Image: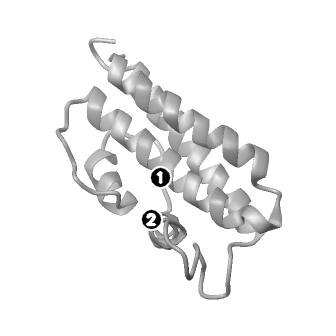
Amino acid sequence: MKKATKGWFESAESDLLLIHEISLIEGLTHVSAFHAHQAIEKSFRAIIEEFEIGFVKTHSLENLYNKVKTLLRIQIDIDKLIILDHLYIDARYPGDFGLLPNGKPSVKEASAFYKTAKEVFDASNAVCQSAPNT
């Protein structure tokens, strides 16, 4: 595995550790969602780096997923990625602060986002571990 790929995974793992610590805190569910987005984005970018797919200038999980989905061995709920994309944008700025139509994500939703991020991380890591030239 390339050094840069490992860097992406280390950064994604930090996001996952943070989510694990705060996902049950109701007042921080929007932060959990933000870091779930980050962990998934970094996991996708690790694949892009490892397989030399090229620079992809976007933070959209949907667009990044479309670049790497043929390499992944899991099925990802595209609707979750779209929701996380919206939460990611809103969580970065004051105002709506990472809100769903009915307010902040619930603890249950935050836990589901964490689960998705962890699954993407694990699947992405497995793909990169089995890549030629590792």
Q: Which of the two residues, 52 or 132, is positioned nearer the viewer here?
A: 52
Q: Quadrant of residue 46?
A: top left
Q: Are marks 2 and 1 in contact (CB under 8 Å)?
A: no
The structure residue drawn at horizontal position 60% and vertical position 78%, both measured from the top left corner, is: 99
Position of 127 relative to 131 (above/below) = below
Percent coordinates x, y for residue 127 in the rendering: 41, 29
Q: Quadrant of residue 72?
A: top left
The structure residue drawn at horizontal position 49% and vertical position 71%, both measured from the top left corner, is: 93
Percent coordinates x, y for residue 117 in the rendering: 57, 48
The structure residue drawn at horizontal position 35% and vertical position 17%, both measured from the top left corner, is: 3
Color scheme of the displayed model? one colour
The structure residue drawn at horizontal position 45% and vertical position 69%, both measured from the top left corner, is: 89
Residue under circle 1? 75
Q: Which of the two residues, 57 or 91, is positioned nearer the viewer here?
A: 91
Secondary structure state at the residue bearing disc 1: loop
Residue type (three-letter) at the residue carrying disc 2: Ile
Q: Which of the two residues, 17 or 111, is positioned nearer the viewer here?
A: 17
Q: Which mark is residue 78?
A: 2
Residue farthest to the left, as pictured:
54
Position of 42 relative to 30 (above/below) = above
